[in-house]
């Protein structure tokens, strides 16, 4: 998917909501556990109930790998279901990969060519030659960790590195890499006050923002400091939507929660863009 | 596996060689491609030919994920084959994972409980709460990236962060984490001159060392600066061993290459420990 296609979808749906499909068998409705593939059935119901309210789905690969081959099959069925039924959706493999050059190429193939995701998240620690192999894929997007939403973000990401905080070094260095136009960045919603600094370095890039809702981040604060003329934000919510209920009505309740966020986004967009 | 068991194996085999099982279908002997699971058959032949010369096998998960579910099945068969036939071997899932707390727990379950690896490699960028979930598993080991063997290591790992290079900050911070006795570190052989500095911070930890051979690192240099009283090194070689030949004799040639390294290790151990 191209960036203009992503922006068009956002404007059309009046939403920049990404729903995280982090499916834990201990948290989903019990009646699903009797089915052959409970994870896929859960995802399918969530997707059917929310696809018009969100512009992206983001399965976190950890939740699938934890169930071995069966989990990997659920992931494959989920991405196939999205691509076949809702090709307008921007899909994110939240995998946080990164390795030396030839190995990163293998990861890129896994997510872009075998599973047909539009994007994958990567970690920056190993530097340029660990990320550029992902950037080489046309119309695919690489979402690099910059400033994450967790407490441990302060261990290294905000250290003063050569005169500026490490996450800023990461941003500044990354924009010099080949095909850096294919980069997006992870910036946690719990750190809204950092967004204006980040926008000075990457004014036009899309930012994937976890941490709204369950982790305490504020949508309006993030939009105030992080939004650009093309929206430029993919706001992720996982638990707050997909686990809104663990009863028979889970998909309906998930839709209600997604709708609340979408309406808030529509309001923000109408104020900013008069649309 | 406990650390004393690992050390006992090293002393018994007079080897601290780890063989990287990074299997690329475009590089393995053609005659294997006709079999139902060429990747597993390749690994099985390599393992049969080398298990007495090495103390560890390290499949890099990227090379398996790139082939989707079939690749994941090959990985599972490979780890099962090692655990059933050579339980003394220290197994490493080279996965370079890392995510927020509950997600890292899912990754840890994937590699420690579903696949039964002894250890997994992780990335440090997200800090304490992304790594501690791995450390909580008893008799399992978490191998964190410190200073990697690639060129991109100089992008961020050697930046001056709060007065010292970032990789040193990573090492120093990590030893304060809960269950840090379960940590090992990745340090590239291409940076042998850094080992004495690293040993000042983590004198007793095992270091997983890629980059000997194909990437140009020197075994004797690494041992000179990095070895401690319990050896403390796992020297990885991948391509130099497993792709020594792509003909019918590939396993025999792999053994010859592994033997060369093992004999060099035996010599180094005999000089240092008079054994």
Image (tube, coloured by chain):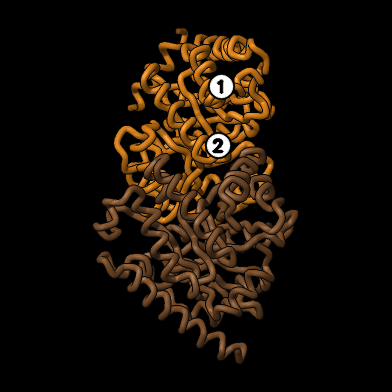
Chain colours: A brown, B orange
Task: Answer few, some or many: residues within 10 Å of disc 1's Cα (few below 14, many 20 plus, some between 14 and 19).
Answer: few
Depth check, front residue: A52 or B204: A52
At a point 52% along the width and 37% down the height, the residue shown is B61
Q: Chain of mark 2?
A: B
In space, the residues marked 2 and 1 are separated at their CA atoms by 48 Å
Residue B157 horizontal side relative to residue A188, left or right? right
Residue A263 seen: yes
Give the labeled residue for mark 2: B197
The answer to whether residue A14 is above or below residue A170 is below
At a point 59% along the width and 67% down the height, the residue shown is A88
Q: Whole-percent x and y of residue A121?
A: 55, 55
Front of the two marks 2 and 1? 1
Depth check, front residue: B182 or A75: A75
Which quarter of the rendering shows the N terminus of chain B? top left
Residue B165 seen: no
Q: Whole-percent x and y of residue A82?
A: 51, 60
The answer to whether residue A45 is above or below residue B215 is below
Give the labeled residue for mark 1: B35
The answer to whether residue B237 is above or below residue B205 is above
Q: How many marks?
A: 2
Q: Chain of mark 1?
A: B
Q: Whole-percent x and y of residue B126?
A: 48, 54
Q: Whole-percent x and y of residue B205?
A: 43, 32
| Marked residue nearer the N-terminal end (2 or 1) | 1
Residue A43 horizontal side relative to residue B68, left or right? left
Which quarter of the rendering shows the C terminus of chain B? top left
Task: Answer few, some or many: residues within 10 Å of disc 2's Cα (few below 14, many 20 plus, some between 14 and 19).
Answer: few
Depth check, front residue: A108 or B220: A108
* Secondary structure type for disc 1: loop
């Amino acid at each position: 998917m191209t960036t203009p296609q992503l922006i068009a979808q956002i404007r059309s749906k009046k939403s920049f909501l990404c729903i995280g499909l982090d499916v834990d068998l201990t948290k989903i409705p019990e009646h699903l556990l009797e089915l052959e593939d409970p994870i896929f059935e859960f995802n399918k119901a969530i997707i059917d109930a929310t696809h018009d309210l969100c512009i992206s789905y983001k399965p976190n690969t950890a939740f699938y790998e934890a169930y071995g081959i069966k989990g990997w099959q659920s992931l494959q069925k989920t991405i196939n279901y999205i691509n076949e039924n809702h090709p307008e959706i921007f899909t994110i493999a939240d995998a946080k990969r990164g390795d030396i050059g030839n190995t990163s190429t293998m990861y890129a193939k896994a997510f872009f060519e075998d599973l047909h995701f539009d994007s994958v998240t990567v970690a920056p620690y190993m530097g340029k030659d660990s990320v550029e192999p992902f950037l080489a894929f046309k119309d695919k997007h690489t979402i690099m960790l910059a400033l994450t939403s967790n407490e441990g973000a302060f261990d290294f990401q905000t250290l003063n590195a050569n005169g500026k905080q490490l996450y800023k070094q990461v941003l500044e260095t990354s924009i010099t890499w080949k095909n850096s136009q294919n980069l997006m960045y992870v910036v946690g919603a719990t750190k809204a006050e950092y967004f204006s600094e980040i926008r000075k370095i990457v004014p036009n890039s899309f930012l994937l923002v976890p941490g709204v809702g369950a982790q305490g981040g504020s949508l309006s604060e993030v939009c105030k400091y992080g939004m650009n003329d093309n929206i430029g934000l993919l706001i992720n919510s996982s638990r707050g939507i997909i686990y809104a209920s663990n009863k028979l009505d889970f998909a309906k309740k998930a839709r209600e929660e997604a709708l609340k966020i979408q309406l808030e986004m529509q309001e923000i967009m109408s104020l900013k863009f008069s649309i």
